[in-house]
Amino acid sequence: MTPTPEQPLPGLDPAARAWLDTALTEADRAAEAAEDPGTPGPAEAVGTAAPTGSGSASDNVAPAPWELRFAAAGRHAGRPHADAVRTLLLHRARAPLATLTRLYRHGTAAERRAVLLALPDRVAGPGALPLVEDALRTNDTSLVAAAVGPYAAAHLDPHAWRHAVLKCLFTGVPLDAVHDLERRAHKDTELARMLADFAAERTAAGRPVPADLTRALNLTGEES
């Protein structure tokens, strides 16, 4: 379960709750420190993410205490709660885009997923698209599913968004994960063409056409 940014996380045992309370206190302190006029703060979130794998000055910054908690969330809060805990920490720390990019670049798949899930709350414009694009280049279905959420729906251009839909079909990610699918697919004739071509390739190869493909094609207004 992923809570709203200000909603307490239910279901934690007392030890995990105590650990989270400390982590949130550390995140709040980081957010307060960033409000100092001489310190870059949340306004960085409108910048542009550095390409994954490239170096930057932020890579040389020692991790803040809350960032260490971010990495350890699965171990202390439990894997079922890890996404919710990590996205909550990112919100409370008011993590700017530079921090999100660094955590994504150096994180595990689970940590990267949490960064992707936090993007709609943390990044106002398209600056984090390099992170989404990187996730869509992987074959990790958990990352692909996280990448096609509300942030992608708001900021991916039509060409990239269509390929994201195809990526879900290729990798078996349910199209229910694609935020705003119905609106963006409506009367998209190019998406319809791409879906029809994919269906024809599957049929020619003697492979079944995914039900989700037929659903998406119908959403474009074209007959399957």
Image (cartoon, rainbow, N blue to C red):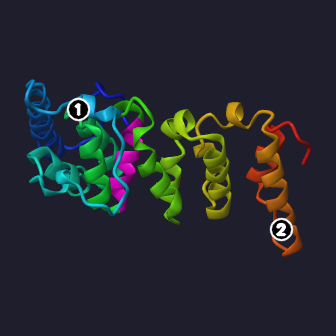
Q: Nearer the viewer, residue 15 or 99?
A: 99
Q: Which secondary structure lies at badge 2? A: helix
Circle 1 Cα neighbour tier, 10 Å, few/some/many (<14 / 14–19 / ≥20): many
Q: Which residue corresponds to mark 2?
A: 201
Q: What residue occupies the far right of the structure in this picture?
A: 223
Disc ID at residue 187? none
Q: Position of residue 182 (x, y in %)?
A: 71, 34
**In the image, residue 183 lies in the stretch drawn in magenta:** no
Of 190 and 219, nearer the camera is: 190
Q: Quadrant of residue 54?
A: bottom left
Which element is circle 1 on?
loop
Residue depicted at 87% across the width and 68% down the height:
203
Residue kind at label 1, given as amino acid type: Arg
Q: Position of residue 211 (x, y in %)?
A: 78, 54
Which numbered disc flags the more N-terminal residue, 1 or 2? 1
Per the model, the C-alpha gap separating discs 1 and 2 is: 46 Å
Question: Whole-percent x and y of residue 12?
Answer: 24, 42
Q: Which residues are magenta?
A: 109-119
User: Which residue appears at 47% of the width and 49% of the height?
Assistant: 132
Instruction: Report the residue marked by disc 1.
Output: 94
Q: Where 19 sits versus 102, above or below?
A: above
At 60% from the left and 43% from the top, the residue drawn is 178
User: Looking at the image, can residue 160 be seen?
Assistant: yes
Residue 90, image x and y in percent?
A: 26, 39
Q: Is residue 107 visible?
A: no
Main SS, magenta residues? helix
Question: Image check: 212 left or right of 22?
Answer: right
The residue at the point 53 percent across, 66 percent down is: 139
Residue 113 falls inside the magenta stretch: yes
